[in-house]
Amino acid sequence: MMMSESSSSSCSRRQRLLNMMRTTKDVYIPAVQNSLSQAKLSLKNYYNSYEESGETLPFDRSIMEVSDRELQLICYPSYTRIGTDKSYVTEVRGMVYTNGKMNRRNRLIFSICKQLIKPTASPDIEKELESVLVDDSIGSKDTLCSSATVNSSDSSSVSSSFSAGSNSTATSQHFQEEILRERLAGFLNKTIPRMPIIVDLVDRDGNQETEFTSTDEYGLFQIHTNTSFLPRMIRVTVDVSTPISTRYDTNLIEDSGIAVISDIDDTIKHTGVVGDKRSVFCNVFVNSFSTWLIRGMSLWYNTLKDSENVDFFYVSNSPYQIYPTLRQYISNEYPMGPIFLKQYAGNLLCSLISSSAKLKIPSIAQICSDFPNKKFILVGDSGEEDLEAYVATARNFPSQIIGIYIRSCKESMSDDPAKDWAVMDELNSIISEKYLSVIRRNTSGKNKKKISPPIPPKKIRITKEQEEDIKKSKLLCSNTRLDKIHSPKTASPLIHSINETKGQPPCAVNIPPQVPPRHCSRQSLSQSPTETTKSAIALQQQDDYALYSLSLDNKAEEWKIRLIKAINTLLDSGVEARFMFFKDADICIEDSISKIRSIKE
């Protein structure tokens, strides 16, 4: 009887549990799902309301709409250095994004760009493109890279086709549009914020150090890691359900020797920043690599690398979106090194021609600070504000900067393009006179040994009899001179008394004749006073016109003012560096190598 009661009670408990499970499955789970659907719908309506009002979104809703398979990862290799505590410091940089879809906005941008590369493009096309490319960097996250260099399944095929296209000289419209599509892709991509990132640093012996970080609001990540071992390989992984990763070798740079910090646009690559916007756009997005080459620059850099083992860093105002293209060009023509570009601000055309030196200084200063025992040569151009950026760097790191070379771009030195090189020569003359000669004198003064003062001669001692003879001799000479003065007009009473005591009559002194008066020069008989006045006025007008003509060259005068200010800053900071403007890089090879070898000695 009792067993039947216990079995019935256990059955009733099982029944209650079953009923609860059915209730949870049939009631609670659908309710939760319905709540989540409503929440998702509310969030979408919330973001849509922001989009319609034109306000900035506080969070990128694209992260809700992107699957793991759509994610792309690109890394920007930097360098590994030895820290103050003998550890190894490695910088890891990169970005997470998805390929830009050809929505209405992107189709419009691409269509306008196709019109812009045509020779018949009107200025209205530029304005139309600028109006579309309003700065929406928070909402659309239009940043950083092209799919040509990402670690995806089709990256190799894209990269190979891109390489073939970039080096071709074909001029067909269809081929130009294909190149345009490839190089413009980075500006149409969507970056993904707040994505978890895993960074693994591994050495040859299997030692491993792991760091965790996440992308910022622009989809970028940057991390500095410290390891007790020298890492040989870096593996970066996006930590999602279907992880994507990429790996690359580290680049150890020693804190010694010489390095070059170089600009890119119009320094090692023809961009034409001082030209019109359409020309700049075509140079960047359509023209082949062969049109980018600047005579002598590749030879100079490769000579420094091969003969003096110089390290290279590239710092530019170019936007990160064209990083893959720039990296491929540099690897083809120049010694490889870390590339530091600027963050895209939204306006495509302005991002290509911006010349603010302030954007370069932080990256340059970081490099100099990371390698305090390394000497640097700074190379830039006259099309941007490289002079001010490099002088500011030399002021902050006076003992590390050993050379400043500014390439003179066409139409940047003078109002008259035909006078560009004359202005360059004049600037170099100012540098030689007011800077290089001064530091040479300072250097020779430091190296010159101080000469001891001469030993004074010993005083000759004489006897009293010799002193008396000397006094008598001086008195006799004095009387003889007085006897020769005979003029009654000029002789003093003392002289008269001396002559009279000797019984000699006074004699007249020979007075030289007076200088005849000067006669005023007469006018030429063949030229009337009126003609003389006119000639003088004409000569004066010619001089005034020459001075007036020189003052019209505003660019040249501005360069002189900038140069004098730069020289004063360098001298005040105690910077002893080679400094010149140049047209052909051939002259820089011998000059820079001579400076490097003098430093090594």
Image: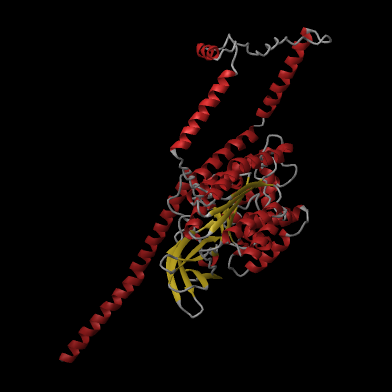
Identified at 58% across, 9% down, the residue is: 488
Q: Is residue 350 visible?
A: no
Camera-nearest residue between 130 and 312: 312
Q: Position of residue 522 (x, y in %)?
A: 77, 9
Question: Which residue occupies the extreme right position in the image?
Answer: 526
Quadrant of the rendered image containing residue 418: top right
13 above or below 168? below
570 above or below 524? below
On screen, residue 502 versus residue 544, left or right, reads left
Identified at 50% across, 69% down, the residue is: 236
Identified at 64% across, 57% down, the residue is: 594
Question: Which residue occupies the extreme front position in the image?
Answer: 503
Q: In the picture, which quadrant includes the C terminus?
A: bottom right
Camera-nearest residue between 455 and 393: 455
Q: Position of residue 483 (x, y in %)?
A: 58, 18
Q: Position of residue 533 (x, y in %)?
A: 74, 11
Camera-nearest residue between 48 and 543: 543
On screen, residue 504 versus residue 238, left or right, reads right
Identified at 52% across, 15% down, the residue is: 498
On screen, residue 521 versus residue 489, left or right, reads right
Picture colour scheme: secondary structure
68 above or below 584? below
Quadrant of the rendered image containing residue 11: bottom left
165 above or below 423? below
Q: Position of residue 455 (x, y in %)?
A: 49, 47
How many numbered marks are there?
0
Camera-nearest residue between 296 and 70: 296
Q: Is residue 395 visible?
A: yes
Q: In the picture, which quadrant includes the N terminus?
A: bottom left
